[in-house]
Image (tube, grey):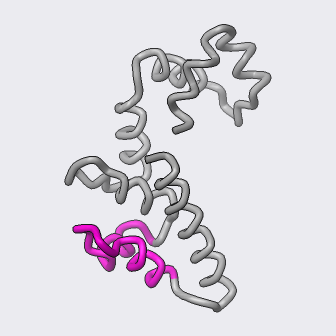
């Protein structure tokens, strides 16, 4: 699923860049990504605005509960993680800036490995 999600996001990122350069349309890219699914491509494009993260999260949704916002998609993804990983993310989430590896190691210590699940 990780590879599929990353390939989808990469394809959509390229489509966004092509559309910005006048070489295609984001809506067309979303339609291609929806081929073979039950998702209405035009509705997905309207809801997400073609946002690559949001599109891939909706397409990867394990059920028909489609998140209505990027925040809801993130919360759904975090909710599927194990307890140890969620606790590590909770601890890092209070940092008011980007967390680099050095800071994450300092804050989590031996629990740093728990974040591997979130990278999938």
Q: Is residue 75 above or below residue 101?
A: below
Residue 46 forms part of the magenta stretch: yes
Could you tell me which residue is drawn at 42 percent across and 33 percent down? Answer: 78
Work out whether residue 114 or residue 66 is closer to the camera in this orientation and state it. 114
Q: Is residue 88 above or below residue 37?
A: above
Specify the segment rendered in magenta: 26-49
In the rendering, at what x and y percent does residue 97 appear?
70, 34
Could you tell me which residue is drawn at 54 percent across and 60 percent down? Answer: 7
Q: Is residue 31 above or below residue 60?
A: below
In the rendering, at what x and y percent does residue 68 appear?
31, 56
Could you tell me which residue is drawn at 27 percent across and 68 percent down? Answer: 37
Instruction: Answer with the quarter of the image where residue 45 lies.
Output: bottom left
Q: Is residue 30 above or below residue 95?
A: below
In this picture, residue 2 sits left or right of residue 76: right
Main secondary-structure element of the magenta-colored stretch: helix
In the rendering, at what x and y percent does residue 73 appear?
39, 47
In the rendering, at what x and y percent does residue 49 appear?
45, 71
Work out whether residue 119 or residue 67 is closer to the camera in this orientation and state it. 119
Work out whether residue 1 or residue 117 is closer to the camera in this orientation and state it. 1
Kindly give the residue lying farthest to the right in the view shown: 102
In this picture, residue 71 sits left or right of residue 111: left
In this picture, residue 112 sits left or right of residue 86: right
Residue 35 forms part of the magenta stretch: yes
Kindly give the residue lying farthest to the top in the view shown: 110
Could you tell me which residue is drawn at 26 percent across and 74 percent down? Answer: 40
Work out whether residue 36 or residue 12 is closer to the camera in this orientation and state it. 36
What is the number of callouts on the image?
0
């Amino acid at each position: 699923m990780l590879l599929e999600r990353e390939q989808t996001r990469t394809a959509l990122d390229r489509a966004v860049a092509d559309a910005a350069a006048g070489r295609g349309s984001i809506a067309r890219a979303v339609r291609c990504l929806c081929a073979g699914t039950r998702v209405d491509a035009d509705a997905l494009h309207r809801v997400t605005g073609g946002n690559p993260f949001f599109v891939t999260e909706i397409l990867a949704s394990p059920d028909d509960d489609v998140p209505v916002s990027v925040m809801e998609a993130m919360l759904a993804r975090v909710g599927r993680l194990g307890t140890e990983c969620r606790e590590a993310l909770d601890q890092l989430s209070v940092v008011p800036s980007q967390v680099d590896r050095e800071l994450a190691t300092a804050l989590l210590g031996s629990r740093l490995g728990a974040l591997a699940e979130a990278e999938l």
